[in-house]
Amino acid sequence: MKRESLLAALGAIGLVACAWAVPWLKFVLTIALAKGIAVLGILLLLRAGQVSFGHSMFLALGAYTVAFLAPAENEVLLLLPAAALVAGGVGLVIGLFLVRYRDIFFGMLNLAFAMVLYSLLEKLYDFTKGTDGIRVAALTFAGTEPERGTQEWVVFGIALGLAILFGLLVRFYLGSPMGRALAGIKTRETRLEFMGVSARRVLLFAYVLSALMGGVGGALIAMTTRHVTPQIAYWTSSGELVFIAILGGAGSALGPFLGSVAFELVRVYAAAAVAEAWQMILGAVLLLVILFAPGGVWGLLSRRWRA
Amino acid sequence: MSEVLLSAKGLRLAFGGVKAADGIDLDVRHGEFLAIIGPNGAGKTTFINMTTGYLRPQAGRIEFDGKPILGLSPRAIVRRGIGRSFQLPQLFSEHTVLENAALAIAARRGIWSPLNPLLRPRWRDEAMDLLDRFGLRAVAEFRADALNEGARKLADIAMAVALEPSLLLMDEPTSGVAAAEKMVIVETLVRVLRSTGVTAVFVEHDMDVVARFADRVAVWSQGRIAALGPPGEVLADPKVRREVIGIAADA
């Protein structure tokens, strides 16, 4: 636990140092932190033995909430909770239906909901501007409207702060009775029921929390890219989140951030090195992780510590 | 308080042409240890599954403490005070034995606290005390899937006891346990259950265990109760010895 906290602190310092030393990396790292927050939600579901292949719908809900609301209310400190509420609320409504299902049905139903949302975002042009997407209006931070360079630092700082906050929240949650019961769904759901505990309610709480974090991640992405398109809800985006979860490892709340930073850096550098084949490089990385490091980056680190 | 804790009347359930319960009438008395014996497929586990809400009988009724429980979910039945253990122990295999016990305690006290640790000092102490009573303190920090079968059975029952049931239904608590361990396990079980005043119904194949620890024995045969009474009487019945225990009547 001490090592985990130390790694988290070193990681946070390392990210700030990278963003300071290589300014263009600030954008990449902010996106990585935003995705890491969303992947924390995937991690929760993985603890219950469930995989969501449609979790990018919550990224999209968060991002579009910012895009829709920004012209009327552009305060980041209000937009972030609004995005979290919208995504969490939708997560609650569809979660009530989804938690009845397990395994492949759970995964594919998530995908189905995400694709319905993608289609709506793409087809309702008058409302969403279709594939052209929506440009996010200028944002204010606690009432101020900083210049571009400062604004990038502020969004990066907020993303880092929220990553630490949600990382701690997930860590405490996983060690709580609810978190341990969540892991119990994976191994002995029957026993939970015969202990008088509703496995569906346990999973629903995790699902809503994961939706909420997805919404926050999406809002941060919208605030960083300042342009939102339906692509964010597409199935490849959901696949990316699962990819990051596997890459980082589900053994710790640090895993999603290790995975997302590694993913974004590999993507950026692979795209720069071999523009036509960066997906192939990402695929090869995933294959190597599955074959040689099934616990992901976190698994490699913790194995080294134990050795 | 009525003498009868659990009352089953006219329970019927068939799976296709197989009658797993064919008119079961059984009263379980407060504080007794009732053993259920019978050949495989006689409907013993089906009775437990019906009583705990896992299966719903096609006819009949079940009352617990004078109130009907038929149609209630397993969760609701647990909350009424009926616990169960399983033939194949249902432990959370990725958790430690201590966490398993603490989670069962949390289930009774309320698990809906997302930020407080499961192993908070009070619950840890309570879980340790529970494991101590079952002789499992030494393996408290072991992962549940690392235990031998006897310890797994005890941990499974300890989790049911953590819920503080009035009635505990145990499905073959000694099956798969080495012969040398069997009596030790049952003695531990009986000591804990007697000390907490829990009424127990257990399915058992070992007649020595039945003879030594049961107050009454119910003999299941083809979905019916073929005999019911004190062990000395039932186990001496030539028909029971021949058809259920598989011993020649004059042996």
Image (tube, coloured by chain):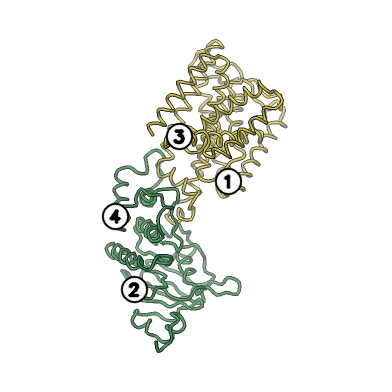
Chain colours: A yellow, B green
Q: Which label belongs to residue B132?
A: 4
Residue at point 57%, 49% (across, down): A102
- Identify the amino acid type marked 3: Arg
Q: Quick one: A31 or A150, which is closer to the camera?
A: A31
Q: CA distance from mark 3 to mark 2?
A: 54 Å
Q: Which label belongs to residue A179?
A: none
Of marks 1 and 2, the one in the foreground: 2
- Identify the amino acid type marked 4: Asp
Q: Position of residue A160 (x, y in %)?
A: 48, 23
Q: Position of residue A174 (x, y in %)?
A: 44, 40
Quadrant for the C terminus of chain A in the image: top left
Q: CA distance from mark 1 to mark 3?
A: 38 Å
Q: Earlier in the sequence, mark 1 or mark 3?
A: 1
Residue identified by numbered label 1 = A98
The residue carrying pointer 4 sits among few (fewer than 14), some (14 to 19) or many (20 or more) residues within 10 Å by Cα, namely some
Left or right for A265, reference B62: right
Left or right for B238, reference A273: left
Secondary element under disc 1, as helix, strand or loop, is: helix
Q: Are marks 4 and 1 in contact (CB under 8 Å)?
A: no
Q: Position of residue B68 (x, y in %)?
A: 43, 66
Q: Chain of mark 2?
A: B
Secondary element under disc 3, as helix, strand or loop, is: helix
Residue identified by numbered label 2 = B214
- Identify the amino acid type marked 2: Ala
Q: CA distance from mark 3 to mark 4?
A: 35 Å
Of marks 4 and 1, the one in the foreground: 4
Visible residue check, residue B139:
yes
Secondary element under disc 2, as helix, strand or loop, is: loop
The residue carrying pointer 3 sits among few (fewer than 14), some (14 to 19) or many (20 or more) residues within 10 Å by Cα, namely few
